[in-house]
Image (tube, grey):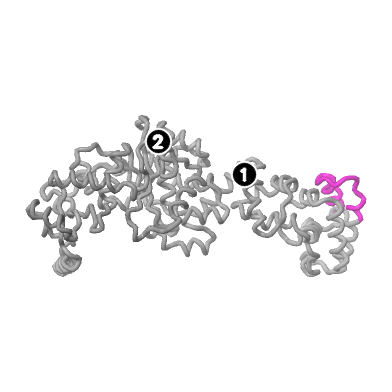
Amino acid sequence: MDLKPARVRFAPSPTGHMHLGSARTALYNYLLAKKTGGKFILRIEDTDQKRYVPGAEQELIDGLRWLGLEYDEGPDIGGPYGPYRQTDRKAIYDEYIQKLIDKGSAYPCFCTPERLAAVREEQMKNKVQPRYDGHCRGMDPGGAQKRVDSGEKHVIRFRMPKEGKTTVSDHLRGEITVDNTTLDDSVLIKSDGWPTYHFAAMVDDHLMEITHVFRGSEWLGTFPLHANIIRAFGWQEPVWVHLSVFLKPSGKGKMSKREKEDAIKDGYSIFVTGMSELGFIPEGLNNWTALMGWGAGETEDVLTLSEMIDKFDIDKLNASPAAINFARLDHFNGEHIRRLEAWDLAKRIRPYLEREGLVVDEGKLQMIIPIIRERLVTLDDCVPFAAWFFKEVATPPAEELLPKGMAAQQVKQMGAEVLEILKGLPSFSHSTVEEPMRKYIEEKQLSPNQVFGFLRVAISGQKVSPPLFESMEIVGRDTVLARVARAVDSL
């Protein structure tokens, strides 16, 4: 891999939530920039004002920062190649489209939407690939300019070569050659004066000295157009990297924003914000998305961001579609949760407990972390395991206190005997409690499920909890004795 400092850009449109595919594109940009000692740039492509969503730009910025992908230049921090928001760059596009018109590489088109629709309908009827028919392509430039000056509504189209072939090179797919007769004279400037993506992105990439362009494979269809625009200016092309597409979990069809409801039903999201709210952590999400389209080349697949930077190599990216595997996300998320320092994990799970209306004692939370860490797949898993530590547990109904195969009177006697043992212990550490409990089980020929199950429900109010004896130590002698006593009385 060429290790010259790369200048790369993440250039989203603020038209909605940040998709997982966008997160992966941003991640690869970030990894290449850090690997090569280059720059990672955020550029907001907001010229499509009809699709603009208020607040979407800030959500994109917040999403990048949550993922840990700090950019070096951007709309909120500035930089030497700004502005970094396309709506602030209109004068630049006006200048460069005029250069193309002067070169004869672009021309005004005055065709009405009605005419274009009629042409398209006729082409489809004749089973011809729909494209612009070149009606204004041969117009006298002087006459065209007079119509523009008079204020007649028009767009500016690119004059695509009509003979020969166009060959473009993608880093993952190699050379792609198309016959120029199949290419369209695409619109570069819309009738409202704003550029299309095809034009603005090419101008911006050149002026911002972008060396590598990571983008989705959906842009392969217009790849020859983009290359021809750059070549019309005589500019050097960046290294193009069209990334693999994300498939639905079934492997059938592209994973798109329309599949969000299916993901939600399974407890997941296809958006970065949604994943954060569901308790996934950026370390797990980055690890998961990075390896969908990149073979790190090692058996160890749990990687931190710094480890990914060390290993990243665009030569090891692949173009094969990758099916979304949420179970693999669970694996990575759980592994990264277990790697967190106790204080860090406590800080991250605290909001999930507080949104349950709990008052969280920091000292107690620090004690809980070691006994729940191994059980967490997502941060919000802390609620069923840890919430009961911070609230007054009501005495469970008698039927919930009864282990399988035991009558109420048997359990009442067992509970009373266990209570007396607990009262007589010299201390209440988990090791001090566990040994006499196991001895009691052996003497009475009971099963651990019977004794421990009763104690777990009596103390926590639920049948699933972290390790029993460690939990009892955290809850404390007085609270444990009071809850067990109430449970015995209820029987």
Task: Give the residue drawn at x 68%, y 59%.
Answer: 357
- Residues in magenta? 420-440
Q: Is residue 103 visible?
A: yes
Q: Secondary structure at mark 2?
A: strand
Disc 1 to disc 2, how far (Cα)?
A: 32 Å
For badge 2, the amino acid type reads Lys
Q: Quadrant of residue 413?
A: bottom right
User: Which label number is shown at residue 365?
Assistant: none
Q: Answer whether residue 432 is magenta in the image.
A: yes
In this rendering, position of residue 209 left or right of residue 95: right
For badge 1, the amino acid type reads Arg
Task: Give the residue drawn at x 21%, y 47%.
Answer: 97
Task: Give the residue drawn at x 67%, y 59%.
Answer: 356
Q: Of circles 1 and 2, which is in front?
A: 2
Residue marked by disc 1: 338
Query: Residue 472 at what x, y percent from top left?
Result: 80, 51
Query: Residue 247 at what x, y percent from top left?
Result: 40, 56
Q: Secondary structure at mark 1?
A: helix
Depth check: give the residue in front, 76 or 121.
Answer: 76
Q: Quadrant of the C terminus?
A: bottom right
Query: Vertically, is 169 above or below 111?
Result: above
Q: Quadrant of the N terminus?
A: top left
User: Which label number is shown at residue 39?
Assistant: 2
Depth check: give the residue in front, 451 or 329.
Answer: 329
Task: Give the residue drawn at x 40%, y 35%.
Answer: 39
Query: Residue 216 at what x, y percent from top left?
Result: 35, 50
